[in-house]
Image (tube, helix red, strand yellow):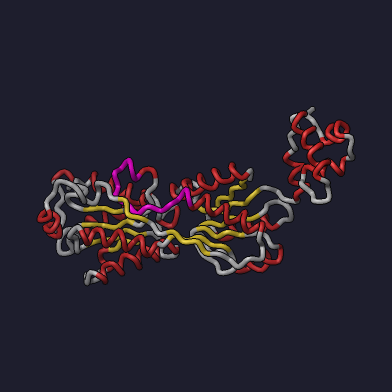
Amino acid sequence: MGITIYDLAREAGVGLGTVSRCLNNHPSVSAKTREKVLAVAKRLSYQPHAHAQRLASRKANTVSTIIPFFTNYFFIEVLQGVQDKAAELGFDLILYGVNNPSQAEYYLRRSLHGGRVDGVMFFSMQFPESFVLKFQQMKLPVVIVDSYHEKFDSMLVKNHEGAMQATRHLIGLGHRNIGMINASLDTRPAKERLSGYKKALEEAQIPFDMERVVITSNGKQDGFNREAGYESMKEIIRRSIGHNHISAVFIASDVQAIGALQAARELGVRVPEDIAVVGFDDIELAQHAQLTTVRQPMHEMGTIALQMLVDRTKNPDASPKLSTFLPELVIRQTCGAGGKESSSALASRDGGIELEPSAT
């Protein structure tokens, strides 16, 4: 059995209450007594029991993390940031993966049970209005990540601006017939990335044509998946045969872009020679695929989100804060920038896509 506060009290010649107050830095203890007790604790290599510490501080040192789509590459990298910060601060995480709003509400109810957690991190979903007052009354901190609620601390990526960067880059390379592969417009990122794409076209006086946009919500993760990107790229290529001449495509997520690149290879369509590709996220796979993309600071988002939650526990009555991140363009090979092609070759790409014989 390890050293206990009973041992410290006996060795220091003080009561248990005095030992407890010394260990918790209580102001009622004299500096001389505190110094004596801490010296005994150091000599005996005393390690406080984690559960006892939590009881004494009335904190669980545990955070609920309610997140959709555990297997999504974006969330995996954000969660790595959360986990790294949790380890640094000595917090435990309870991870709840959800597939529909009713599951999210169930886990929110569990989080409200007194003493279970010190706060909730709620990812990429609309926070249910029916729970707002309950969390406020209990003063249980909430941080909304990749979404927004005016009553809670929130963190957002500027999806609109990121999509504009991607589309402007393709325009700067000489493309005018630029397509987009998107996911479900029920999600905030998909809506904002579509609006950024349209705004960049408008700035360049390029007419927006819905025929050049493929929107899918099929399968898992609201359409932000490899299979959806694969099928959508096939559709983009099909629409490029003839009058529409799509020469470049902005894709709303890297995982979709990975599927899209596979589809292009299978159809004998060269990237970037026949069609330039830009993704969004900069997941680890993007570098391996040499994918030009718009980088979200995923790991940093995770660490800052947990720090926001901890700060809120210390200052529960402060006004809610909104943190925003501006993505940055990462140029690699799939867009054709910096390659061996001449500017005239880039300018001629709007002549359309022809499938190689092996694809037919």
Which residue occupies the foreground of this view, 248 or 353?
248
The residue range painted magenta reads 286-300
In the picture, measured across the screen, residue 278 lies left or right of residue 15, that is left
Q: Is residue 298 magenta?
A: yes
Instruction: Look at the picture and state if 40 lies above or below 144.
Output: above
Q: Is residue 133 magenta?
A: no
Which residue occupies the foreground of this view, 122 or 38?
38
Quadrant of the rendered image containing residue 104? bottom right
Residue 100, percent from left and from top: 54, 58
**Residue drawn at 35 percent across, 68 percent down:** 195
Image mark count: 0
In the picture, measured across the screen, residue 343 lies left or right of residue 133, that is left
Which residue occupies the foreground of this view, 130 or 238?
130
**Residue drawn at 55 percent across, 60 percent down:** 144
Instruction: Look at the picture and state if 210 lies above or below 330.
Output: below
Q: Quadrant of the N terminus?
A: top right
**Residue drawn at 40 percent across, 62 percent down:** 159
**Residue drawn at 32 percent across, 54 percent down:** 329
Instruction: Look at the picture and state if 358 lies above or below 306.
Output: above
Residue 232, percent from left and from top: 31, 55
Looking at the image, can residue 128 be seen? no
In the picture, measured across the screen, residue 143 lies left or right of residue 294, that is right
